[in-house]
Image: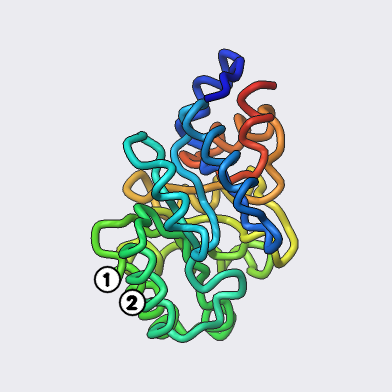
Amino acid sequence: MAEYALSEAGRGIAPLIDHTNLKPDATERAIAFLCEEAVACGFAAVCVHPCRLPYVASILSGSAVRPCTVVGFPLGANTPEAKAFEASDAVSAGAMELDMVINVGAIKDGNTDAARADIRAVVNAAGRAPVKVIIETALLTDAEKVLACRLAAEAGAAFVKTCTGFSGGAATETDIRLMRGTVGSGVGVKASGGIRDLKTALAMVAAGANRIGTSSGLAIVTG
């Protein structure tokens, strides 16, 4: 296995990183490298599309890195039943964490019951696997961001997360502070979208994030 020279700050932030490759054209070789880097650097998780999950779970078996996949990705417009099936299927395939996309339209409508039920369906289907709820900050007002975070917490989510990266926007310190202030200390906050260097990652942690989603994990920890 390759060895990487992590910076001092990189070693500190490595356990917070979800090393991610959600490109539609990601090859098996690219996914293998992703896993190799994650294990060598001590990242929290490897996040890939569901079709790559069994392969990732087999590579990461015996390591401390957790296989992770996405649900309702990237638009969040699937039915709760479809998302619940995705979640259950992913756990059966080896997922130890799930990142789901919220029903953005329900949030925009102010339909709190539908948005909450959508999240709860995934949380229930996931069992013990923590669920991170992507609220897609670029599409929401501040009031809607607060509502989405509150509903995620009420539905049993383990984390709230900023962006998919597929609907524009990026994680910002302002959004992280708002999200952390809404969910308090009992729910995690994952900053994702546009985090490509150590300075940005550290700024997100300082603002209240305790997980970082990025495809640039290796660059972040090695400087």
Percent position (x, y) of residue 138? 69, 63
Q: Secondary structure at mark 2?
A: helix
The mark found on residue 219 in the picture is none
- The extreme right residue here reads 168
* Disc 1: which residue: 124
Going by the numbered disc 1, the residue's amino acid type is Asn
**Residue depicted at x 34% and y 55%:** 130
Q: Secondary structure at mark 1?
A: helix
Q: Are marks 2 and 1 in contact (CB under 8 Å)?
A: yes
**Residue depicted at x 55% and y 45%:** 177
Q: Is residue 32 above or below residue 80?
A: above
Label total for image: 2
Going by the numbered disc 2, the residue's amino acid type is Ala
**Residue depicted at x 64% and y 46%:** 30
Q: With 49 as the anchor, is 194 left or right in this view?
A: right
* Disc 2: which residue: 121
Q: CA distance from mark 2 to mark 1?
A: 5 Å
